[in-house]
Amino acid sequence: MGGKKGIKLIDENGLRHDGRKPDELRPIEMKVGVLANSDGSALVKFGRTHVLAAVYGPKEPIQKFVLLPDRAVLRVRYHMAPFSTSERKSPAPSRREIELSKVIREALEDIVLTNLFPRTSIDIFLEVLQADGGTRTTAITAASLALADAGIPMKALVGGVAVGKVDGVLVLDIDELEDGNGEADMPVAAAPDIGRITLFQLNGVLTREEIEKATTMAYNAIQKIVEMEKEVLRRKYLAEKEGDEK
Ligand code: ADP
């Protein structure tokens, strides 16, 4: 067996190049309130993929023409830092970054209760500090935490993860090597508490059965990711409460 470029991605024991089982997530770290000068912030790490999210708002934006009379406008900027990739990335926003900003916004827009804040904007800045595959789904997870940290009401928390296919095997939370050498990459974002999938993309080829299996793998993992988000927010809330009582 070998990947597209002859790289072996599943070994004789059925393990991946980094020792993970097919349905295993990378080590995940989540922190909220990491920035002093934003209304809400979060740093999320899926293995070597690290994304920082900063939220400003709801506020009255300088450019009034973007305002909507009945709800807040959600603005998202996904950006890869020049030092985030193995080859220095140009700091200027690429087509890919502009498109990703849009799909990430769509993954969050329906979840945020924007109708509570007419004529305001909520700005979400997503900075990829280190990229090793899955930056869009990590960015969505970080954005969800940063929105909650900013106290912005949401219908539910959102999480994301990509499922891929390497050496004919469906694998959870693919990294850059698996993405670049595998047969398929399927990023998914969902709000499991309200049973919604808010981002679903497929690069490569899967059978219908594989798509169903991959969706279940992603959805189950997102349930775990969202539980982690809740735990991180709970801990911050308790720490703040303790601070207030002192
Ligand atoms: P995602 O990060 O959501 O998986 P892609 O599938 O487009 O999005 O990218 C896969 C991975 O390829 C990224 O996470 C990153 O590690 C790498 N990558 C993407 N764009 C660049 C770039 N301009 N330079 C170097 N590596 C990149």
Image (tube, rainbow, N blue to C red):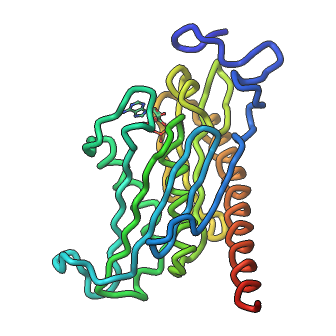
When asked about the image quadrant of residue 222, the answer is bottom right
Residue positioned 73% across, 86% down in the render: 241
Whole-percent x and y of residue 90?
Answer: 29, 36
Residue positioned 67% across, 71% down in the render: 233
Whole-percent x and y of residue 112?
Answer: 48, 75
Residue positioned 43% across, 56% down in the render: 126
Number of dots carrying numbers: 0
In this rendering, the answer to whether 234 lies above or below 213 is below
In this rendering, the answer to whether 118 lies above or below 19 is below
Whole-percent x and y of residue 10?
Answer: 71, 18
State the residue lying farthest toward the bottom.
245
When asked about the image quadrant of residue 66, the answer is bottom left
When asked about the image quadrant of residue 155, the answer is bottom right
Quadrant of the image containing the N terminus: top right
Residue nearest the viewer, comparing 80 with 242: 242
Quadrant of the image containing the C terminus: bottom right
61 on left or right of 150: left
In this rendering, the answer to whether 1 lies above or below 186 is above
Whole-percent x and y of residue 242?
Answer: 76, 84
Quadrant in which ligand 1 is drawn: top left
